[in-house]
Amino acid sequence: MEYFAQQLINGVTLGSIYGLIAIGYTMVYGIVGMINFAHGDVFMVGGFLALIAWLALTAMGVTAVPVALALVLVLAMAFTALYGWTVERLAYRPLRGSFRLAPLISAIGMSILLQNAVQVAQGPRVKPLPPVVPGNFFQSEGAGGFVVAISNVQVIIVATTLVLMVAFSLLVAKTPLGRAQRACEQDRKMASLLGIDVDRTISLTFVMGAALASVAGLMYLLYYGVVDFYIGFVAGVKAFTAAVLGGIGSLPGAMIGGLLIGLIETFWSAYFSAEYKDVAAFSILIVVLIFMPSGLLGRPEVEKV
Amino acid sequence: MSALLSIKGVTAYYGAIAALKGVDVDVAEGEIVTLIGANGAGKSTLMMTIFGQPRARDGLITFDGHDITRTPTHEIARLKIAQSPEGRRIFGRMTVVENLQMGAAVTKFAHYDEDLARIFAIFPRLKERAGQRGGTLSGGEQQMLAIGRALMSRPRLLMLDEPSLGLAPLIAKQIFSVVEELNRTERLTVFLVEQNAYHALRLAHRGYVMVNGRITMSGGGRELLERPEVRAAYLEGGR
Ligand SMILES: Nc1ncnc2c1ncn2[C@@H]1O[C@H](COP(=O)(O)OP(=O)(O)OP(=O)(O)O)[C@@H](O)[C@H]1O
Ligand SMILES: [Mg+2]
């Protein structure tokens, strides 16, 4: 029982990180109908930027952990957002209106470029970060002597994710920008007839997705204490799977899909074998897609016209 | 006469195919101008070319004296030209109110409450359906929504592409009378494309006839209605 509870906690933590990345995939897919294969690498870049910002801040003598963390968060989000904007501008916008596969190929190219650039700049080995937020938020002595613990880092990850997801959902549902994004998703030409700057709206979508991915990068860094140039690929594929599982294009779907993938992976490693955790996650994806081709929360097409 | 909208020698293409072959049209402030023509004549293309979708290849389009021939589409909309386009193009997954809010975007919501109340007064049906998704409205309700959305921007020029298409005669008539009243009471300028030539020309101050990408006739609305060529081609049976 304690073991189960512990796995649940770990799974939710991991799932939160996947969910944050998955939102970027789902938003971009919704608005430009393209899988942004470089998104996982934007997450990786976010992780590195967080590491660099952290080291720089501590070198500058900022030692209060909450202050430093908040600053790192803001810095990583800002730089990664700029990154997302640039990638969209350079690699995708010039190809808009060209054949469907062109931006996809460009995205794969961008992904390789980002990976290699970081590998060259930061070296191929993993970069460690000494534990920043040690300690447990909650701890219990179980009957069999097994300890259930929720670490402070886990609390930070889940709480940050919750806050961001609520804020983000409100933004999309209630603000003019969110409405413009949904309008561009549904009918770009009509949106422009109503005075919406479609290019700008798409840029902002990339920026928002990238900012969330960078938060995920920081969370990953805090949780595992290491980053390397390859984490973007693995986490990217998982988060993409999460987005598809939840129903690509659906925001709550991305969150739920992220949680599910995190839980499946954690429980599979805990009870069966860690080597086959990815096989489990992808098998469940395949099963879900066979019975629900548009994912768990994929939109049923009920419209006229 | 200083035209609010002036179109001179405009051509437009889909790939290599010319859809507009040198079109001249003027719409003066406070006028209702109707464009009629057979299917495929290029009427909807002209409406969209004013917004640069597709771009005019030759010619000049000015609005209120500004050259808008090469202006980006969304900036043209921000000059307060609004269109209820062919096929209505309602945002199906947004509610009625959200669709209307999309129309208010160019006003930066400066007089949103007042304008919403006005649209609901013109089309009480939309008020009843305020929270319903656009995609589940009936065809007539969608048409009202498309016009309401266009009006939410407080346009200086309202363009309507076949507003009566697919509507019951009674509702079509209601839509025409709304247009007429807005023109009469607020001097709203209207550029209208219609299959329903009889009603549309009776409503209009002036009209144009388009054949195969060219304007072949123009004149006063009722004057055009009297012409035998117009009657023969667009008013079979006299209506
Ligand atoms: N997207 C497009 N691609 C290629 N050809 C097009 C496109 N849209 C319209 N056309 C062609 O351009 C011509 C003019 O079309 P348009 O829609 O402007 O006609 P219309 O006068 O509005 O007709 P209707 O009364 O049927 O609405 C037609 O021959 C049509 O086939
Ligand atoms: Mg048409």
Image (spheres, coloured by chain):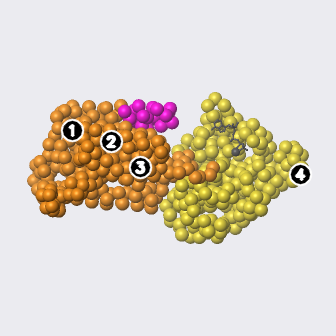
Chain colours: A orange, B yellow
Structural distance between the alpha carbons of marks 1 and 3: 28 Å
SS label for mark 2:
helix
Image spot of residue B4 (x, y percent): 65, 53
Q: Earlier in the sequence, mark 2 or mark 1?
A: 1
Disc 3 marks a residue whose amino acid type is Gly
Which residue is disc 1 drawn over?
A228
Q: Which residue is mark 2?
A: A280
Q: Are marks 2 and 4 on the same chain?
A: no
Q: Secondary structure at mark 4?
A: loop
Parent chain of label 3: A
Residue A122 location, x and y as percent? 19, 36
Q: Which mark is residue A246?
A: 3
Is the same chain shared between marks 2 and 1? yes
Which residue does the image show at 49% across and 48% down from the upper left? A185
Query: In the rendered structure, which segment of residues is drawn in magenta?
Result: A88-108
Q: Earlier in the sequence, mark 2 or mark 3?
A: 3
**Front of the two marks 1 and 3:** 3
Q: CA distance from mark 2 to mark 3?
A: 16 Å
Q: Identify which residue is drawn at 39% across, 43% down.
A: A285
Q: Is mark 2 within 8 Å of ligand 1?
A: no
Residue for badge 4: B238
